[in-house]
Amino acid sequence: MAAHGPSEGGTDDTYIVIPTYNERENIVPLIEEIVRLYGVAGPRIVVVDDNSPDGTAAAVVETGARFPNVHAIVRSGTRGYGHACADGMAYAIDRGAAFVITMDADFSHAPESLGPMLEAAREADLVIGSRYTARHGSDVQNWPLSRQWLSRLANRYVNWLTPAGVHDATSGFRCWRADVLRRVLSRRESHAAGYAFLPETLYRAGLEGARITEVGSVYRGRAKGESKMSLAIVIESLWIPLRLRFSRL
């Protein structure tokens, strides 16, 4: 099935940024699934790897002969989801992207939702693939009830401190218009290292007056590999929205 993006030319102006650390088991099957759904000439895929010791980046490079639209960036220095996303976004923008999508490498974000997200981007500056919107397609699968409650509490916390008016403020499955994303990234003095990057950029998108919408998306719990959640990430996720609230005041 070929997917069509917001532009008449298809998806060649769309970049999918996938931050990775120790995702060798998942990343090649994910690339293959995206290409199966949207074609070899579909969205460009940028894997931003934090120098994984399991050889994630090498596995991505090896796909180059089959998939010329796949690019690998190996980061050095401070690791972190937020840093990797920002670097991948900047890479895409610098190469003329019109739309920049972020998604996880572990299949938690459904590749089949990319088409509907790009369609929604015709009328929006930021499209969120939402686990919790009432719209058709929103679902959570293979995730412990404790994690679901923690996720919902985190969303309530973020929306309480930095109200964005969305159901899923912590979703990392997003499609940005590149011109708006460029302004959002330029607003920050520094950005969060971990998953707090998500409410931070959502908040700054609101400051930019961005048109934000959500589409229903299936969220599937990780089947392979280990979660990157840590105490430091949790603390940062509590602190960053609080800091943003005080900066607003």
Image (cartoon, rainbow, N blue to C red):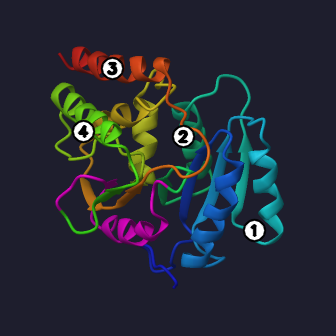
Q: Nearer the viewer, residue 26 or 78?
A: 26
Please state which of the two labelled residues, at mark 2 or mark 3, is closer to the viewer: 3
Element type where label 2 sits in the image: helix
Counting residues from the N terminus, which is met first, the one under dot 3 or under dot 1? 1
The answer for how far apart the CA atoms under marks 1 and 2 are is 21 Å
Q: Amino acid at mark 4?
A: Arg
Q: Amino acid at mark 3?
A: Leu
Q: Nearer the viewer, residue 226 or 170?
A: 226
Counting residues from the N terminus, which is met first, the one under dot 2 or under dot 3? 2
Q: Residue 102's x, y, as percent?
A: 49, 51
- Proximity of marks 1 and 2: CB atoms separated by less than 8 Å: no
Is 74 inside the magenta-drawn segment? no
Residue placed under numbered mark 4 in the picture:
152
Element type where label 4 sits in the image: helix
Q: Quick check: 239 left or right of 178?
A: left
Residue placed under numbered mark 1 in the picture:
68
The answer for how far apart the CA atoms under marks 2 and 3 are is 19 Å
- Proximity of marks 2 and 3: CB atoms separated by less than 8 Å: no
Task: Read off the magenta span.
Answer: 108-134
Residue placed under numbered mark 2 in the picture:
85
Q: Amino acid at mark 1?
A: Pro
Please state which of the two labelled residues, at mark 3 or mark 4, is closer to the viewer: 4
Element type where label 1 sits in the image: loop
Res 89 label: none
Please state which of the two labelled residues, at mark 2 or mark 4, is closer to the viewer: 4
Residue located at (52% from left, 57% from top): 107
Give the image quarter of residue 189.
top left
Counting residues from the N terminus, which is met first, the one under dot 4 or under dot 1? 1
Residue placed under numbered mark 3 in the picture:
238
Q: Sort mark 2 into few (<14), some (14-19) or many (20+) by Cα contacts within 10 Å.
A: many
Would residue 196 be visible to someone looking at this image?
Answer: yes
Please state which of the two labelled residues, at mark 4 or mark 1, is closer to the viewer: 4
